[in-house]
Amino acid sequence: MNATQEAPLDVVEPLPAPEPLIAAPRPRLGRLRAALELLHDLSVAVLFCFFLITYVGQAFRVQGASMQPLLEDDERILVNKFAYRLGPIRRGDVVVFWYPRDPAVSFIKRVVGLPGDVVELRRGLVHVNGRPLDEPWVAAEFRGHDSVGPVEVERGHYFVLGDHRTSSNDSRAWGDVPERYIYGKAVFRFWPLGRIGRVQ
């Protein structure tokens, strides 16, 4: 190399332009797709909840004292709507049903008489088919002293009573409940926390 010639400079590539600090807005199509996916997920969740509430279980708030001492006013319970798709309604079950005189209203009572039974109250004591019914769920002070019947329960119907006999509007006043009106079995109390447990 000639001493008077300068050495070639190192080759330098230009630096890329700096990336913007704020990301470019997503294309409109991407937003639409995200909105559709969200709508889809919400629809599935709503349908799932509808299925659960309609066919499986639902939470209810107890109103009134007709089921004392088992259930107190304002307690929250879970009602199994699937129970009677798997098995029959039994004597002693605590059931939720549409009030026969106003199907827009739900009642909760205990099944005492099955289809074909002859139910009679003698001074507050329930007799079914001529025999006294063992009712450990009725407190002595709530039993009352009224007499009703004898009444034969119609086919496809049930005779229901509140556990608090002196504070209950039940089959003594308006007769049997059609089976098609009974839509669930009370199974669990979840509020208040101090009384959590099975309903039986």
Image (cartoon, rainbow, N blue to C red):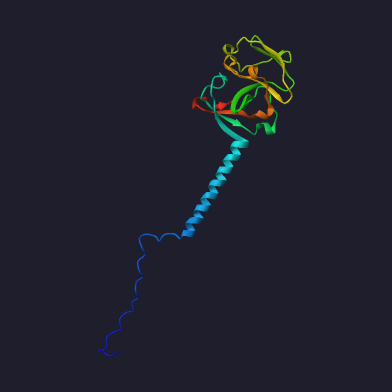
Report whether residue 8 is seen: yes
Q: Residue at x 58, y 33 (%)?
A: 58
**Left/right of residue 154 with respect to residue 60 in the rendered view:** right
- The residue positioned 55% from the left and 29% from the top of the image is 60
Q: Which percent across, then down, holds residue 198?
A: 58, 27
The one nearer the camera, 57 or 29, is 29
- Residue at image location 57% in from the left, 16% down from the top: 167
Extreme residue in the bottom direction: 2
Q: Closer to the camera, 83 or 109?
A: 109
Position of the N terminus, as image quadrant, is: bottom left
**What residue is drawn where x is 60% and y is 34%?**
57
Task: Examine the rendered structure and indicate whether residue 86 appears above or below residue 166.
Answer: below
Q: Nearer the viewer, residue 180 or 24?
A: 180
Q: Position of residue 74 (x, y in %)?
A: 51, 25
**Residue 24 x/y as whole percent:** 40, 61
Residue 87 x, y percent position in the rendering: 70, 31
Quarter holding the C terminus is: top right
Question: In the picture provided, is 189 more to the left or to the right than 151?
Answer: left
Query: Nearest the camera: 180 or 44?
Result: 180
**From what the image shows, is residue 199 above or below residue 139?**
below
Above or below, 37 relative to 175: below
